[in-house]
Amino acid sequence: MTQTLHRRTFMLGATLAAAGLAAPSLVRADDAGVDANISSFRAKAWKDYFPSLRHGAILADTQSRAVHFWSEDEATYLLFPCSVPGSPDLTRTGMTEVVEKVVGPTWRPTPSMRQRMPWLPAVVGPGPDNPLGPFALYLSWQYYRVHGTQDTRKIGRKSSDGCIGLYNEDITDLFKRAKVGTQVHII
């Protein structure tokens, strides 16, 4: 029987485990009276996607619209909902890594975005109107980021032009844990 990992259950279990208390068992979708397709949050094993956890690992799953994070020492596993690219032609998959961590990133539309949407501003500095939110993890692929978003309606949807977007509180947590060199696999 496949088990569905609900973020609240996982976070509570992780918190209780860290405190040395008994963690609740994972809730199965059919036991919870929830349609199994409502949430795609399923725990994944890092070994299926990475050769090691050197520098930690981030898996961005564009099908389930979830970001998984494993710390280098395997003590931390986190699961976040995310936004993903809006179409296959905007989606880049494969292995990359975090090459820069930016607090208060400046957003500049890519050349292809400017062609498709010429009304976009040339640049948006840090602040409440910035589509990158308060933090961004720059990847080794030009123009690709894992970042926050001011538009929370995008989370859980195919709504980006290539980046992986997280709730601002989730990118804040991930930003603290990830480091330059953290492996990123987008599937």
Image: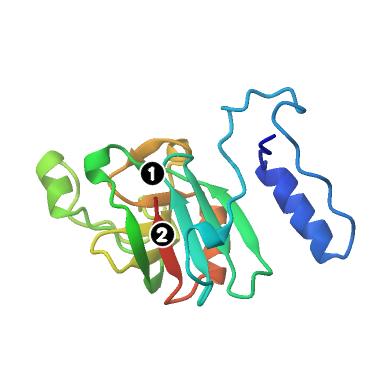
Where is residue 45? Give x, y as percent: 58, 56
Residue plotted at (47% across, 65% down): 50
Residue plotted at (28% across, 58% down): 107
Seen from the viewer's position, the closer of residues 118 and 77 is 77
Residue corresponding to mark 2: 185
Relative to residue 93, is residue 138 depicted above or below? below
Residue plotted at (70% across, 34% down): 1
Mark 2 burial class by Cα count in 10 Å: few <14, some 14-19, many 20+: some
- For this view, does 55 lie left or right of residue 104? right
- Between marks 2 and 1 in the image, the one whose residue lies nearer the viewer: 2
Q: Mark 2 vs mark 1: which is more N-terminal?
A: 1
Residue corresponding to mark 1: 84
Residue plotted at (59% across, 70% down): 71
Amino acid beneath label 1: Val
Residue 100 quadrant: bottom left
Amino acid beneath label 2: His
Where is residue 110? Give x, y as percent: 18, 54
Query: CA–CA distance between discs 2 and 1?
Result: 13 Å
